[in-house]
């Protein structure tokens, strides 16, 4: 008889990059899971029960206990299912670099992305410049901290930062199209090469939403459909 | 003898997190006081992204961001653990650390950058109190410390709520962690400061109050 409690359930939303991170981590580790698509404008009782403080996706349920916040979920997954492939490197210093850049993504890049969609004129231009500066900082940092390309390029598997970058940048063309910008490009060659390689990774292709669907979603964020 | 340096500024609660973690693990280090406002070349070189303290330099390698540093310390010197052993409890600890990190700005802004508009002021105070309520009921709950019977990484992350916040409360007359409203959280601030490593490693209170007063005036 199957032990229901040990079942892994992921509450998420198809367009939430934070949800996609967890999907990728679970699939990478070969962990079977049940996926529950949440309607974020009408959240389920279970979601509110399992994440009462933030009421957000993703939430991972394991052994009947909820874990919230994507980075925390990924660390949990890596610790509980500690077989290869590892999401984080073994070496403490390398781990600290991965955590540092994961935090940089979440504290600087992510919060700047959505507002960019909503701005116009000079403010938009400034936001684009700020975002380009962050990409430049990321480029410099990646070059310094991961000088031998990435394990992914060596034919080894993807890890936590690949997941973060892959999810954020997989649909960079959709973002460019909707904002009329070119933030990811050859001016940051290391990131550009990394992102384009990740776009071809079968797990990314299998998991992340396609270009047209994302363009349509981004457009509704800019101009929400009026109430009927 | 390992080569461990901490770049810091005497008044920073973030720097103190690193000092406490190292002391709790009995790790020796060289402390280097860095001038505020970006004049230190060593700081710029070792933290080019943020140019801020604290920075830990271990065997020539730099680690920035206080919570990343604490996790590095835990990974490198696992004795006297600051995080629970069980992965689920560890995930919970990380949740509360993040909760604290996400709340800090709105709590300190209450004192450092108060809204001049009365209505807005009332709203921002209420929001801060709601946050503290969550910490009171769900963070600390029935425990003496966030970490249980002994302090852990979560307690270090919340260290700013004692001593520093007390200074700000004194300067402004706004008693945020009111013992009648937040008895557990208030008790925690007192218990935390009594832990020997913490007690022996706090900036001088009077000096801190003068410094916070000065910084507050810079903003206003």
Image (tube, coloured by chain):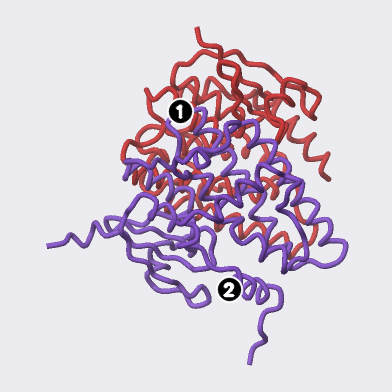
Chain colours: A purple, B red
Label 2 element class: helix
| Vertical position of residue B195 compared to residue B4: above or below | below
Do marks 2 and 1 both belong to one polypeptide chain? yes
Image-quadrant location for residue B36:
top right
> What residue is at 84 percent from the left and 61 percent from the top?
A123
Q: Dot 2: few (<14), some (14–19), or many (≥20) neighbours within 10 Å?
A: few
Closer to the camera, A8 or B209?
A8
Specify whether B172 is left or right of B55. right
Disc 2 target residue: A213
Residue A108: % across, % down? 67, 48
- Residue sitting farthest toward the right: A122
Q: Which residue is drawn at 49% across and 48% down?
A: A71
Residues under numbered marks 2 and 1 in contact, where contact means CB atoms less than 8 Å apart: no
Image quarter (top left, top right, bottom left or bottom right) of the N terminus of chain A: bottom left
Relative horizontal placement of residue A84, taking residue B15 as reference (left or right): left
The percent coordinates of residue B7 (x first, y second) are 65, 22
* Subunit ID for the residue under disc 2: A
Residue B58 occupies quadrant? top right
Of B137 and A50, nearer the camera is A50
Q: In terms of secondary structure, where does tag 1 sit? A: loop
Task: Quadrant for the C terminus of chain A, please.
Answer: bottom right
Position of residue B93 in the picture relative to residue A164 (left or right) = left
Name the chain letter of the residue that bears numbered label 1: A
Of B59 and A47, the residue lying toward us: B59
Of the numbered discs in the image, which one, if any, rests on residue B139?
Answer: none
Residue bearing the label numbered 1: A91
Number of labelled discs?
2
Taking depth in this image into account, of A189 and B25 the one nearest to the observer is: A189
């Amino acid at each position: 008889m199957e032990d229901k409690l040990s079942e892994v359930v992921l509450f998420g939303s198809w367009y939430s990059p934070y949800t996609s991170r967890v999907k990728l981590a679970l699939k990478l580790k070969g962990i079977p899971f049940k996926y529950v698509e949440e309607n974020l404008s009408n959240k389920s009782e279970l979601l509110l029960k399992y994440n009462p403080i933030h009421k957000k996706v993703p939430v991972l349920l394991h052994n009947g206990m909820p874990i919230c916040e994507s980075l925390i979920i990924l660390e949990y997954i890596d610790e509980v299912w500690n077989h290869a492939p590892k999401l984080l490197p073994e070496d403490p210093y390398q781990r600290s670099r991965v955590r540092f850049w994961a935090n940089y993504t979440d504290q600087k890049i992510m919060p700047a992305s959505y507002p960019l969609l909503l701005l116009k004129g000079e403010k938009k231009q400034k936001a684009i410049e700020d975002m380009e500066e962050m990409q430049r900082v990321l480029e410099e940092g990646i070059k310094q901290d991961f000088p031998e390309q990435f394990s992914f390029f060596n034919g080894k598997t993807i890890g936590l930062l690949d997941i973060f970058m892959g999810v954020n940048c997989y649909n960079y063309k959709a973002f460019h199209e909707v904002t009329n910008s070119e933030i990811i490009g050859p001016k940051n060659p290391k990131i550009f090469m990394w992102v384009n390689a990740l776009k071809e990774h079968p797990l990314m292709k299998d998991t992340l939403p396609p270009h047209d669907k994302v363009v349509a979603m981004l457009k509704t964020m800019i101009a929400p459909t009026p109430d009927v | 003898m390992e080569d461990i340096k901490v770049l810091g500024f005497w008044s920073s609660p973030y720097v103190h997190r690193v000092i406490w973690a190292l002391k709790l693990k009995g790790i020796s280090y060289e402390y280097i006081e860095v001038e505020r406002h970006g004049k230190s070349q060593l700081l710029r070189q070792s933290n080019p992204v943020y140019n801020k303290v604290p920075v830990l330099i271990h065997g020539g390698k730099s680690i920035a961001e206080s919570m990343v540093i604490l996790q590095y310390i835990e990974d490198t010197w696992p004795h006297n653990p600051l995080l629970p052993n069980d992965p689920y409890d560890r995930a919970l600890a990380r949740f509360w650390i993040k909760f604290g990190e996400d709340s800090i700005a709105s709590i300190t802004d209450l004192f450092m950058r108060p809204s001049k508009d009365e209505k807005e002021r009332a709203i921002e105070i209420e929001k801060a109190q709601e946050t503290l309520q969550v910490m009171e009921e769900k963070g600390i709950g029935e425990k003496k410390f966030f970490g249980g019977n002994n302090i852990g990484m979560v307690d270090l992350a919340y260290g700013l709520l004692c001593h520093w916040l007390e200074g700000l409360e004194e300067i402004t007359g706004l008693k945020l962690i009111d013992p009648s409203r937040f008895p557990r959280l208030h008790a925690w601030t007192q218990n935390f400061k009594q832990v020997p490593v913490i007690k022996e490693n706090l900036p001088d209170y009077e000096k801190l109050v003068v410094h916070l007063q000065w910084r507050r005036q810079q903003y206003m």
